Amino acid sequence: MPIRFRLSPLVSAFATLAAALVLAARPAGAAQGALLEKTVDVPRDKAIPVAITYGRATLNTVESINDPNASDVADATAKDPKDVTFLIIRFRYDSDDYMKHKVKLHTILLDEAGGVVADASHSATMDPKVKDDTISFPMKVRTVDWPKATKMKVLATFLD
């Protein structure tokens, strides 16, 4: 014969309330994690430290590849002000964690006044137990606007 337990109405109500609070704290389909942000100098000729850490994973540096040089900017200014250059934005990261992390990276190039020069975003996975791995994605910027960019805002949304 099975043993049955009966809960008092007060304990039952408390258990129901606790379960409702747990479910309300995390809506169905909602991603849990963190939004971390940092503003750094524009990475022109070298990688710039970012140091965004989530758990035991760290985005160490950001760099840009395929930057337009002075002659590219001069040509675009003279011939085609709407000319665009596709930069490659590359983040280097380390992860000492035992689980992988999904991250959405959003980078915004800002001018001196804080206006947006260009932006790009990319979702990626940070693998566990790796040293010096990369996440890379393209960013389209008008060639004539490249010299105006002074700061890069990095937004990293970690999804679990």
Image (cartoon, rainbow, N blue to C red):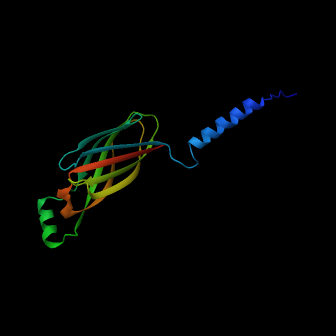
- Residue that appears at 19% across and 69% down: 81
Q: Quadrant of residue 113?
A: bottom left
Which one is nearer the viewer's eye here, 61 or 32?
32
Which residue is the extreme one toward the bottom? 79
Residue 130, visible in the rendered structure: no
In the displayed structure, 148 sits above or below 157; it is below
Q: Quadrant of residue 78?
A: bottom left
Question: Residue 141: x and y, percent?
Answer: 25, 61
As drawn, is 77 to the left or to the right of 21? left
In the displayed structure, 7 sits above or below 52; it is above
Which one is nearer the viewer's eye here, 9 or 90?
9
Q: Quadrant of residue 82?
A: bottom left
- Residue that appears at 29% across and 49% down: 153
Which one is nearer the viewer's eye here, 24 or 128?
24
Question: Residue 55: x and y, percent?
Answer: 42, 34
- Residue that appears at 37% across and 49% down: 105
- Residue that appears at 56% across and 41% down: 25
Question: Residue 19: x and y, percent?
Answer: 65, 37
Which residue is the extreme one toward the front? 10
Question: Residue 60: x and y, percent?
Answer: 30, 39
Numbered-mark total = 0
Q: Quadrant of the N terminus?
A: top right
